[in-house]
Amino acid sequence: MTAHQDDSMLGRARVADSPELTAYYGELADLEAGALWTVANKIEPWYPQPLSVPVLWRYAELRPLVRKALDLVKADDAGRRVVMLVNPGRRDVSAAAGLLYTGLQIMGPGESMTAHRHQAAALRFVHEGTGAWTIVDGEKLSVGPGDFAITPNGTWHEHGNEGEDEPVIWQDGLDIPLVNALDAGFYEVHPDLYQQPRPIRNESVLAYGANLLPYGADKWTRPYSPLLAWPWEPTYQALRNLAKTTEGSPYDGVIMEYTNPVTGGSVMPTMGAHMQLLLPGQATKAHRHTGSVVYTVAKGRGASVIAGQRFEWTKGDIFCVPSWAWHEHANLDASDDACLFSFNDFPVMRSLGFHREEAYPDNDGHQPTG
Ligand code: GTQ
């Protein structure tokens, strides 16, 4: 702690308790009121004090339990058959980190679920299985392992698995805790229970997926990307190509953001997403920023140091970086790439003017680990 961060210093609340004050606080409480100075230092901290802690969820440990849910509950009874990843500091709001929710959804061969829409925005990252589809506002999308897709807030959506043998496991990311923190949640079941998809599959990927703006794109006025899915192969290829030109960010390696092709901005107004590549043996330096991030290992194996704690990860693992936590990543494989998919609340931070970032100042940019 630096001198100005000492709560006993001038300029911060430092009122000692006394019997008179305790009685006074009681009188205020009886009127649903309170004295600011009793909570000022807590509610206006020097820097963010996230309730979330760094967590690594191992796919190898979760997967058998996710598969068990197939037999335990019917998809239609559950609504969505999802194992949520719950941060021990945010159980009250079912968040994985900050105000972001994530979970592993499993759909058996031939299964499909009814359509709904809600205020929360959703995104998907596919872990395994080849038969997954989702219909987003009438557009039917097929998604496979490593693919990323979005379900912007207010869009009708329903999911299924048209594969014949294998379950699909995909990861959902939603801003449910954010929407609830703002008391803005709504939910509707589709009046016909199912959507009638338009005939062209992956319509937006066909129209926008080559990084060229199609005729008529200027008519798109919604606040989210008209492109709804980003397949793994071109994403990985884009990172490989970028890696030929740069080592990328000192903190994230070769990193690219999934973008709204019309604006160049984040895919949705509340959540952004990235894919990053760490070259064989590459180790990044530590930084911290406002905003929470949920990472999924898309390829390879490595380790991240988050708030001084080291986590080793491998394909399918999920981990989180709470807001303002120092973090750095390393690819532990000397001969193959490692790729991290991640989603975040950066668009919220930026649009509200809350974005801040700092480089780790000491030790050549690396955190000491205990
Ligand atoms: O697919 O609509 O994991 O509404 C949680 C809430 C998935 C979804 C979740 C949802 C969904």
Image (spheres, rainbow, N blue to C red):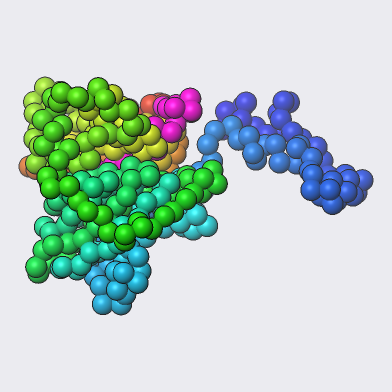
Q: Is residue 44 above or below residue 107?
A: above
Left or right, 99 with respect to 248, comes to: right
Q: Start and end of the magenta stretch?
A: 341-357
Q: Is residue 34 magenta?
A: no
Q: Is residue 346 magenta?
A: yes
Q: Nearer the viewer, residue 83 or 265?
A: 265
**Residue 278 visible to an observer of this rendering:** no
- Give the residue at x 24% y 57%: 159
**Quadrant location of the N terminus?**
top right
**Residue 93 visible to an observer of this rendering:** yes
Q: Nearer the viewer, residue 366 or 33?
A: 33
Q: Is residue 276 above or below residue 139?
A: above
Q: Nearer the viewer, residue 86 or 173?
A: 173
- Give the residue at x 31% y 75%: 73
Left or right, 83 with respect to 168, comes to: right
Percent coordinates x, y for residue 287 in the rendering = 37, 31
Percent coordinates x, y for residue 220 in the rendering = 28, 28
Q: In the current view of this chain or complex, which residue is farthest to the bottom?
A: 72
- Give the residue at x 18% y 55%: 133
Q: Nearer the viewer, residue 338 or 368?
A: 338
Residue 260, picture quadrant? top left
Percent coordinates x, y for residue 298 in the rendering = 19, 47
Percent coordinates x, y for residue 182 in the rendering = 54, 43
Left or right, 227 with respect to 367, comes to: left
- Give the residue at x 79% y 48%: 32
